[in-house]
Image: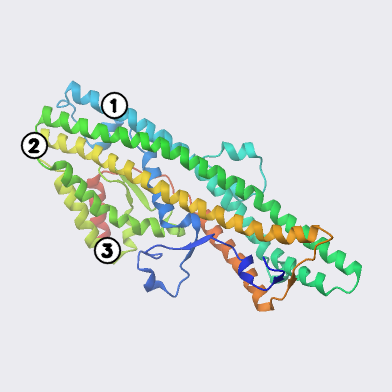
Amino acid sequence: MADVLDDPTFFLPTQQTTNRDRFGKNGKSASKESEEDDTVFQFANGDMGALNRFLHGGRVLPLTPETYYQTVGILNQDKLTAKIQSQIQLTLETFKAVHRDCAGFLGDVQQDKRHLWAKGGTEDEFDQMCTWDKMGKVSGEIWSYSKDAGGKVADDSYYVLMLTYCRKFNEATTAGEKEEARTTVVELTESLLDSIEPIQAHIEKIKTALNEFDKACEKNEIDLQSLETNMTDLLNEELGSIEDLQKEIDDQLKKIEADQKIIDNCRYNQEMTAAYVWIPLIGTIAAIAVYEQNQEKIDEYESKIKELQKLMKSENEDIQIHKTLQGNLTSMKNQSSDLRKQIGPARTTVEELGGGWEFMRVQLEYIHDKAAKFEDKIPSMTMTEIQLNSICNAWNGLETYVASYIQTANVVPIEPMSLDAYVRELDQAKKKL
């Protein structure tokens, strides 16, 4: 950093926000909403939304034969041979692992989250949090930092005060004035640096947790791929082969998956906290209420859902069971693979966030060290009032973005729903338009 502080960009929030991805708040392209602020806190981006969606799907998996048959819609198990039932039991063991990992990541969604806003807390308390709450706690720490950094007006901003006293130090005409300015700069920078320290430490712990979760998901993905192959071979042997069924299911699921990105990118509106339901053959999917707000898409979306519904139906009981069991495992395999694909972007988001705090720490530490050493001269500050106000406004903006994320980050508990029930709700929603 130069000995003259004349560039406000060195003191703005760095790498803390991003733009919504392709879609805006209501699923429309961002270009159509150019008059609205398209900025969100890093954790509110679409990749994090997708991660949240897949995690919640893992929480509602059936874990016993009884709940499995009920969930997938096999009411009569007479056609299930001993070999098929044994394969289903193996499937449920993997479901339990997926459920454990996803529930461990998300924690108790019913828990009161107000503690995430509070300052302080011990490291042991932080370590006991689930990963999602760790992200919430760091968000709360960033919100608190932004509140101090921005202030209600520029004169309350820790950053503006620090820079103002850098100027006062260089303009002072007496030793007493210089010492007062120097001491104030030291106190302000130390306060800010003390707040940055836990933020950085906690970001590192989140990165570690994501790495551990990735390893667990990798094992689950491999297990589900193997289970799908074995179940397909077994069903072909026990109930008869259905040509190209696996490919057709995959193709239909990919068509539907493309629509979910709309929800992942815009879910952090308050009315979007109930954005998802879970369907055995599809996974976690946009709730009907979402498409009531995206009327232009409901016809196209309904046709994709009904194509899958038609594919999975059969008057022949053996074929129906075959399609149901294979469809469920193919869907779970895809969901597991897609979940792993979200961990990399989530890690990148956390790394960008951490990189921004390291940059900001270095800027503050430079000024602190200059002020703390009597033999060094504190850099002079030549910014205009407009430039100082821009620093204040940027931090206040970040405070708003982070607050919006914390208020809406937690999805309400997702309810399982059958494909047929989902189609009926889609039809009813269309009639209301």
Residue 75 seen in the figure: no
Q: Is residue 366 above or below residue 381?
A: above
- For marks 3 and 2 on the same chain, the one whose residue lies earlier in the sequence: 3
Q: Which residue is mark 1?
A: 90
Q: Amino acid at mark 1?
A: Leu
Q: Amino acid at mark 3?
A: Lys
Q: Which residue is mark 2?
A: 316
Expressed as whole percent of the image width and height from the top left, the position of residue 59 reads 39, 39
The image quarter in which residue 303 lies: bottom left
- For marks 1 and 3 on the same chain, the one whose residue lies earlier in the sequence: 1
Look at the numbered disc 1 and give the secondary structure of its residue: helix
Expressed as whole percent of the image width and height from the top left, the position of residue 157 reads 70, 66
Give the mark toward the camera: 1 or 3: 1
Task: For marks 3 and 2, give the CA distance.
Answer: 34 Å
Q: Is residue 370 above or below residue 155?
A: above
Give the mark toward the camera: 1 or 2: 1
Expressed as whole percent of the image width and height from the top left, the position of residue 227 reads 25, 32
Relative to 252, 50 lies left or right: right
Q: Amino acid at mark 2?
A: Asn
Q: Which residue is mark 3?
A: 297
